[in-house]
Amino acid sequence: MENRQKHILLITHLYYPALGGAERVFKRIAEGLIQKGREVTVLTSDALSTEQYYFGVPDPPPEQEVVNGVRIIRQPVSTRIYRFLKYLNALNKVRGFSSLLGSLVFGPHFFKKFWLVLKKKYDVVIVGPTPTSTLFYGLFYKIFHPESVLVVFPHMHIQDRMHTAAINIRVMKKADFVLALTDAEKKYLQSRKIDRARIRRIVNGVDDFLLKRDIQKDEHFNDYVLFLGQEGEHKNIPLLIQAMQNIWDLGFANDLVIAGARANYSSTIDKIIDELPERHLIRLRRINDFSEEQKIRLLDNSLVLVNPSSFEAFGIVFLEAWARKKPVIGAKIIALREIIRDGTNGFLFDPKIKGDLETKIIQLIKDSDTAKKLGASGFADVQDRYIWSKVIDRLEKIIET
């Protein structure tokens, strides 16, 4: 069995040094499989964010390199093509279009680089996330190499029609395995007539060293509310900014830190911040570029991690916060109800209830004992379920089936 399924191909839209939840997951999977003795190749774009599909990559990484044992092949982004596709992508707002061609139009498109991997025989091809075109390249590879095992890892936002489009589901029905991050995602896939025998439950994780690192305290800047993640529209960052404005007007002095890579929606956030009154602006700090070391420091000095996203497949940032014993607040959406146990390892707020988010934040500002209790419970959950070594073991068993 060990001699089979040795060569693995991952096809994903963005990869290291790109930042983001799915990007970090695919990097960790690739490097984890290398540690298991597999040979891993990643086919990806040279963009560091989907925004760069349309505006270009100012400082692109090498087209081919090896990072931590993983061979990376990057397709240079052609802004000319994507600017044309941008007009087609605008049709996603037209009812029904996203179910037909939305993900295929969105990209990325690998062109010449795909032919490089098509010539080689890989035992396992892992593709994702939705709603990108990576699924279709995986299916195309499977057509040419039917003996290969096709694994779709969708990271699906089951409330987003771009993710759940019929064209994506059709590819999943032809895959050998589909990985579901939550029971809710698994049930949804079954409801779309995907063979339950092909669906495998898996979770995301963190490296165990994150739990063991010493706390990095900053005496001059701490106890702030932290958002960590890409600045996508679905992250609901404006909702958090408005909640903090209400909190500041009540006399609380905790700052807000927004940390994450820029995305298409960042220009809207720019305008919102520019229009803030001076008394609020001095309480907000924005960081668009930081290292893993800086991220740990950001977590260690925060009061609470808040991610008000309306769509999430899993929410790996919650695990990272728990690994540093920090409480978390997330939206009361289907996926997060399985991850965050409301009142036990964090809080869930209802986006439909006005003021519910600031109420939860204020509760943790005023009650440090509850904040510590929630963070400690989350830390225990990470130790028990969400360590990458355990996740990779589970994935390897799946692809060896």
Image (spheres, helix red, strand yellow):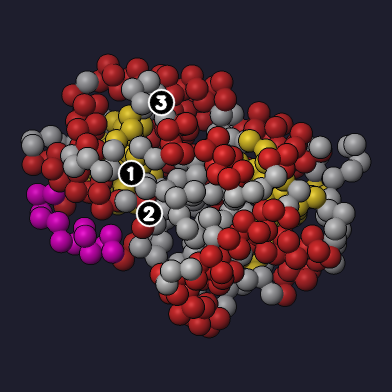
Position of residue 11 relative to residue 204, above or below, is: below
**Where, quadrant-wise, is the C terminus in this rendering?**
top right
- The disc label shown at residue 234, or none: 2
Q: Residues within 10 Å of mark 3 (few under 14, many from 20)?
A: some
Residue 252 horizontal/vertical position (percent): 12, 34
Q: Secondary structure at mark 1?
A: loop
Q: Which residue is mark 1?
A: 308
Sequence-wise, which precedes: disc 3 or disc 2? Answer: 2
Residue 147 horizontal/vertical position (percent): 87, 54
Q: Is residue 328 visible?
A: yes
Residue 311 horizontal/vertical position (percent): 42, 48
**Where, quadrant-wise, is the N terminus in this rendering?**
top right
Q: Which residues are magenta?
A: 268-280
Q: Residues within 10 Å of mark 2 (few under 14, many from 20)?
A: some
Tell whether 333 sits left or right of 282. right
Give the amino acid type for the residue marked by disc 3 in the picture.
Arg
* Residue 201 in which image quadrant: top right
Marks 2 and 1 sit apart, C-alpha to C-alpha, by 9 Å
Q: Main secondary structure of the magenta part?
A: helix
Sequence-wise, which precedes: disc 2 or disc 1? Answer: 2
Q: Is residue 275 magenta?
A: yes
Q: What residue is rendered at 47% in x and 28% in y?
A: 323
Sequence-wise, which precedes: disc 3 or disc 1? Answer: 1
Q: Secondary structure at mark 2?
A: helix
Image marks 2 and 1: residues in contact by CB distance under 8 Å: no
Q: Nearer the viewer, residue 395 or 214?
A: 395
Q: Secondary structure at mark 3?
A: loop
Q: Which residue is mark 3?
A: 341
Tell whether 21 sits left or right of 196. left
